[in-house]
Image (cartoon, rainbow, N blue to C red):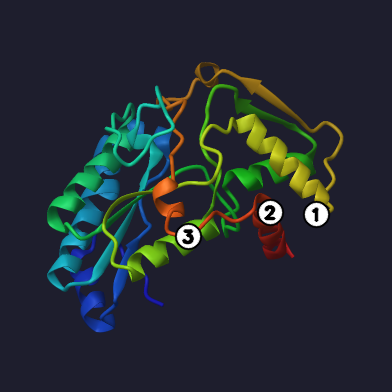
Amino acid sequence: MRRLECADTDGVEVALAETKPDAVVFAAGWSWVDGCEGDPARAFAENAEQPARVAKLCAERRIRFAYFSSSYVFDGVSGPYTECDSPAPINVYGRAKLEGERLIHQLNPGALLLRVICVYGSEAQKKNFAYQVLKAMREGRVLRLPSDQEGNPTFAGDIARWSLALLETKAAGVWHLGGPWPDCKRQDWAGKMVSAFQESGIKAMPGFSIQTIPTAELKQRALRPLKAGLRSEKITALGMPPTEFGGTIRELMESER
């Protein structure tokens, strides 16, 4: 295993020459949405310029390249969205991701541009929404959620499976990789998780509850797209339906043991 700084173009070039990969999946980036709002230069550097340079190196070496973008390229006014809908980001993070898509397509037309949303599953840092729900249950505290945000919960294992299949078939362009409920409200997603965790033997401690408030009352620095679900008929038409929800939670719990 080799650690690389994405900004180190020379180091990336050496790594590509030494390893001669069939494909490069660029899953790095600065995903702290409110942080991006306060530092646009870093947001564009890490989410657009750096991946674009790597995409160019891959194009020159005929190495397949995949870039993970986001549902935040949309304004969230009239979602869920298809790959044919026009992006209109409303925050710095979304604008940086869209610029990443634009630069990469310009420098490497055969690249995969994979938009994802509400990703959850087994994770070393234990930061995604599934772990937030689990932590609140175990600590017996109130989980405050936006009442007006909608988007499809998307299992990380499905994203990996779909991405690999697209790379193997030499697909290119924009693909939406999202779960089966593009209109899912955050509180409904949390409720599904609570039920699934309880079925796995996790008990909610006294004091646990789910409280909903409008996004505006959360007073977050960056605007959020409210109805930003991704329609994923394009990927499921390839015969790769998403994993059943209970199965995704069971896999997460296995990683906890």
Image quadrant containing the C terminus? bottom right
Q: Position of residue 254 (x, y in %)?
A: 71, 64
Considering the numbered disc 1 on the image, is that residue within a helix, a strand or a loop? loop
Q: Nearer the viewer, mark 2 or mark 3?
A: 3
Res. 39 visible in picture: no
Labels 2 & 1 near each other (Cβ < 8 A): yes
What residue is shown at x 39% (from left), y 49% (from top)? 234
Q: Which residue is mark 3?
A: 239
Name the residue rendered at 64%, 55% in the picture. Answer: 248
Describe the element under mark 3 as helix, strand or loop: loop
- Dot 1: within a 10 Å radius of its alpha carbon, few (fewer than 14), some, or many (20 or more) residues? some
Q: CA distance from mark 2 to mark 1?
A: 8 Å
- Please tell me which residue lies in front, 95 or 14: 95
Mark 3 or mark 1, which is nearer to you?
A: 3
Percent x, y for residue 39? 30, 35
Between 52 and 78, the one nearer to me in the picture: 78
Q: Which callout, 2 or 1, points at the residue further toward the start of the chain? A: 1
Q: Is residue 216 visible?
A: yes
Quarter of the image for residue 180 reads top right
Where is residue 110 drawn, in percent x and y?
20, 60
Whichever of callouts 3 and 1 sits on the residue coming sooner in the sequence is 1
Where 149 falls versus 167 (above or below)? above
Alpha carbons under labels 2 and 3: distance apart: 22 Å
Residue marked by disc 2 = 249
Residue type at mark 2? Ile
Depicted 55 relative to depicted 47: above or below: below
Tally of numbered discs: 3
Q: Amino acid at mark 1?
A: Ser
Pick the residue in front: 99 or 8: 99
Q: Secondary structure at mark 2?
A: helix
Position of residue 134 in the picture relative to residue 86 (left or right) = right
Marks 3 and 1, how far apart in space?
Answer: 29 Å
